[in-house]
Amino acid sequence: MRLGLVGFGSGGQFFHLPYIQAAPEWKLVGVVTRSPERCSSLAGEAPGVPAMDSLDAVIDAGAEVVVITTPPSTRCELVLRALERGVHVVADKPFAPDLETAQELADAADAAGKVLTVFHNRRWDTDFVTLQSVLTSGELGTPARATFILDQDEPGSLEPGVGDGLLRDLGAHVVDQAIQALGPVARVDAHLDWVDADHARVDVGFALGLHHVSGAYSSVSSSKLGYRAERGMIVYGSRGSYASRMRDVQADDALAGLRPVTVRAAGDTWGAEDPDRWGVLSTADGERVIPAIPGDHTEFYRRLHRALAEDGPLPVRLDEALHTVAVLDAARRSDAERRSVEVGVR
């Protein structure tokens, strides 16, 4: 199937293009970028793939699906235009600034009879794939409580615009992970860290308490201004606990210049974590190191193709993405009003 990539900033270059290239089911017909520097980067990363100057141009070139990875403030308009042109859409996260806008986009997709999905690619992070395998095994018993930490030492990558901030950025990922692990969220307690940047008030860190419909509770936190890079996942269940502190393996490797296609061509495994960072399962039988399962964000694009070509399940259902946005809305409101806020359950 034919696909167009709209936007070639760090997201397009490091977190979309390498995985599109690694999925042979897709033919990339063009990338929308006007920057001479980014056009040069595209020529190096994807020789022969043309740079184009508009969404319409890439659709006119035959794209059946477009991936929107432009800055958040431009995304909604482009999603609506793509649906109007009759193509399927992958929207980067956050795919909308609030639930009302997200529902507007969902309604537009329904009216157009086209697929709209959201790039929650961190479902295929190495540490999260491994955690899911532990949960599926049943060795933890019934999950009761979890902690998810995603700190990045990247102050320069914060989006300072109104309605942007870290909660809408990394928060969309880590909240989606918590929901995938423990189920839908019923109620939120939130604290956000705020600073003034570029004449706007922007959140640069958050700590969320998520009360899940299942009765489980998760603590979700992130910061980009703490001058530390830390990832942690701890889950407590009725039979024990599991804890991991793996790296952001795929992002680290992509930013270092590695790509899934070339790594595999060399006979190595993409997304593999060093054994000294593998997680530990603790039960009545003692502690056991759990070998990490290599993650691969290419799986998003493989599943998307199966969904469109073979009527398989989408990699990220739209109702799941809407629920994540609803949780983020509740977190904003909880912080502003200094109280717990109920979330509409899907």
Image (tube, rainbow, N blue to C red):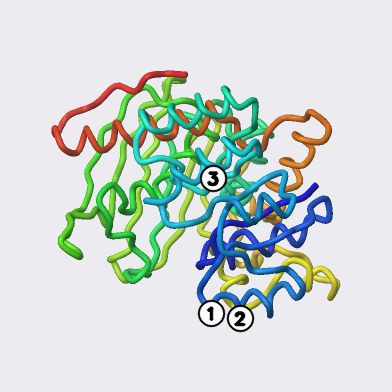
Relative to 317, residue 60 above or below: below
For mark 3, what is the residue?
91
Q: Which mark is residue 36?
A: 1
Q: Is residue 173 visible?
A: no
Of tags 2 and 3, the one toward the viewer is 2
Q: Locate residue 301, reporting x and y percent.
A: 71, 48
For mark 2, what is the residue?
40
Of tags 3 and 1, the one toward the viewer is 1
Q: CA distance from mark 2 to mark 1?
A: 6 Å
Instruction: Give amino acid for label 2.
Output: Ser
- Mark 3 nearby-residue class (10 Å; few <14, some 14–19, many ≥20): many
In the image, is 89 to the left or to the right of 149?
right
Q: Mark 2 near mark 1, Cβ–Cβ under 8 Å? A: yes
Residue 285 sits in which quadrant? Answer: top right
Depth check: give the residue in front, 257 or 160: 160
Along the polypeptide, which appears first: circle 3 or circle 1? 1
Q: Helix or strand or loop: what does disc 3 sit on?
A: strand
Q: Locate residue 110, reporting x and y percent.
A: 58, 23
Q: Helix or strand or loop: what does disc 2 sit on?
A: helix
Q: CA distance from mark 3 to mark 1?
A: 24 Å
Depth check: give the residue in front, 236 or 321: 321
Question: Image point 46% across, 30% down: which residue?
Answer: 322
Relative to 107, residue 336 above or below: below
Instruction: Give amino acid for label 3.
Output: Ala
Residue 339 sits in which quadrant? Answer: top left
Question: Image point 44% across, 39% down: which residue?
Answer: 146
In the image, is 106 to the left or to the right of 5?
left
Question: Image point 71% across, 49% down: which residue?
Answer: 63
